[in-house]
Image (tube, coloured by chain):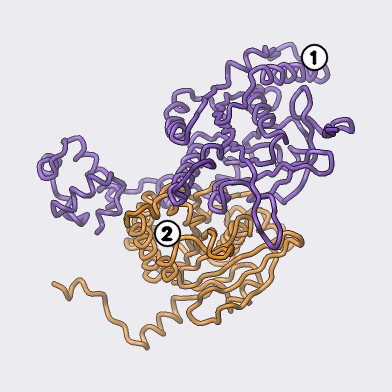
Chain colours: A orange, B purple
Amino acid sequence: MIESQCRPQFNGLELLEDAQLNKRILSTGCERIDLLLQGGLRVGHVTELAGPSSSGKTQVCLKVASHVARKYSGTVMYFDSGNSFSPKRIVQFLTQESDPANTEVDEIVQRVMSSIVCYSIFDIFTLLDMLHQLMNNLKSEIGCNVRMLIIDSLSSLIAPVLGGGGAHGHALMVTAGFLLKELAHEHNLSIVVTNHMVAGEAGSSKPALGDSWKSIPHVRLLLHRYRATNDSCISILKHPYLATGKTMEFMIT
Amino acid sequence: MEVSTLPISASHRGKLISSGYTSLSSLSSVSPSRLAQDLKISENEAVEILKVVSRRSGSEKIENGNHAIMNGAQTAWDMLHEEESSVCITTSCSDLDVILGGGIHCKEVTEIGGVPGIGKTQLGIQLAVNVQIPSGYGGLGGKAIYIDTEGSFMVERALQIAEACAQDMLEYDNLLRKDSQACRVIKQPKAFLENIFYFRVCTYTEQIAVINYLEKFISEQKDVKVVIVDSITFHFRQDFEDMALRTRLLGGMALKLMKLAKQFKLAVVLLNQVTTKYKEGSFQLTLALGDSWSHASTNRIILHWNGDERYAYLDKSPSLQSASAPYAVTGKGIRNAAPNCKRVKLM
């Protein structure tokens, strides 16, 4: 009975084949971020974008959503907890990328916008419900080809339950994290979550959600915006195969 | 423990686990009366728990086509069309409206912060009046909820602003619609006051209670289009010993307000105070309640003095660029800045 519960084994060669066939790299739409990440966001990875308020996390999420929906076939799911999903901004990104002489821009916009699905989530339990439902749908392959899942922002859903003496909030956070990793790996999705910052020691800031969250995402990126010039800077906090501490300046117009 | 991820109360969860129901499969085949007996709870409560379980197990089939992959989801294309047909709440200051993309948007939470005396409450009262402008004049024709935590709402001032608004609508009629006899809705200033629902809260528990109650209130009233909280920070700043509790309460409150905004398609306006923060070697003014609260709003506007004039700066927005605009607080309310509306110098 234990054997039937055990997950199937893979040897190294099978894993490599799976990686080459299924786990593609999705470009983010922003050249410099792609340069930093050596291609972009990898399918099967959970990527965390942390940063202080107004550093551009939602903008990067919208840009990635519009680019991935346009360039790769398949649906992009956007879970929004702050009513910040802006269809107008997605149209702006799409028209920026198109050739101005291209007369089919409207059709492209319609096709792409119809494959971005946005869902508003306002508490952690609904999030867990939706993730389970997504997992069930993907397992039974009901007509959807989900390429990417973006959760903006995960930290505002977890913050109201985290802490306070009980470990219940903590358990919910870790459950959600493992569910995301399973979704990403088993069903070949790329997952992006955003996190905010809290005060750390000696006046510096650190990403929220604590130490146990640190080991859950595969890739952790930190965003920072310079007020004076409106440039942004992205740096790697954690990555399975790239060096940490690498930074790159970029701008979202 | 799958049962710990269900949205049920802590006592029910404890009873389930101690009776041996730790996984969803164990709950899928038990009858409500058996469950009520095992847990020593009423049968209604057992039925509620089983409903939650069946929702989680995904036993409800999806009927819609493969666009809405999950219930309640919308494609960006549909949302774009909805957004194009939505109306904003004007602030009566055209410069400010321009940087806000038309005014205060519905379905979004806007945070407005500034130093004392800059005009936050004035802006709040102006919005409570402007939301009632009928749709014939380009407004929403809705009602307002004003939650006052500081006691700064003055009814006489609201009446003054309402009179000025009615006056403006009359002038608009005379200037532009000389020929239309129909749809001349003359709104009395007192009628404006009738449509502002005023709540006064004195502690943070009252504040949280009011916000929890709003859902029921708004579904009964049906026409509320703006909820103004003045100010959201007051009761959370003094004497809060447990900062972690404060963060959790604020996080929960922020999500409830977001949900209200989305569910009832109304605008939520939160007025905030400022504090100083030591950053990059100097003390800077930032909005109160810390870093975690700064993520609670969709848009953020900071009101500040620039020399002797009042300026509004759009700090955070998902689709608009940061920009600044001057405005003035006059006898009629918030209006465009004019050369004579400067700060009074105290000798």
Please indicate, yes or no, whether residue A182 appears anywhere in the rendered image: yes
* Residue drawn at (66%, 29%) of the image: B127
Q: Secondary structure at mark 1?
A: loop
**Residue under circle 1?**
B179
Q: CA distance from mark 1 to mark 2?
A: 56 Å
Place residue B9 in its image quadrant.
top left
Place residue B272 in its image quadrant.
top right
Horizontal arrangement in the rendering, residue B206 relative to residue B35 (left or right) = right
Residue closest to the far bottom: A13
* Residue drawn at (70%, 32%) of the image: B90
* Residue drawn at (49%, 57%) of the image: A151
**Residue under circle 2?**
A144
Quarter holding the C terminus of chain B is top right
Same chain, labels 1 and 2? no
User: Measured from the top left, where is residue B304 in percent x and y?
Assistant: 74, 43
Residue closest to the far right: B339
Residue type for callout 2: Cys
Horizontal arrangement in the rendering, residue A142 relative to residue A250 (left or right) = left
Q: Quick one: label 1, few (<14), some, or many (20+) residues within 10 Å?
A: few
User: Measured from the top left, where is residue A142 in percent x and y?
Assistant: 36, 58
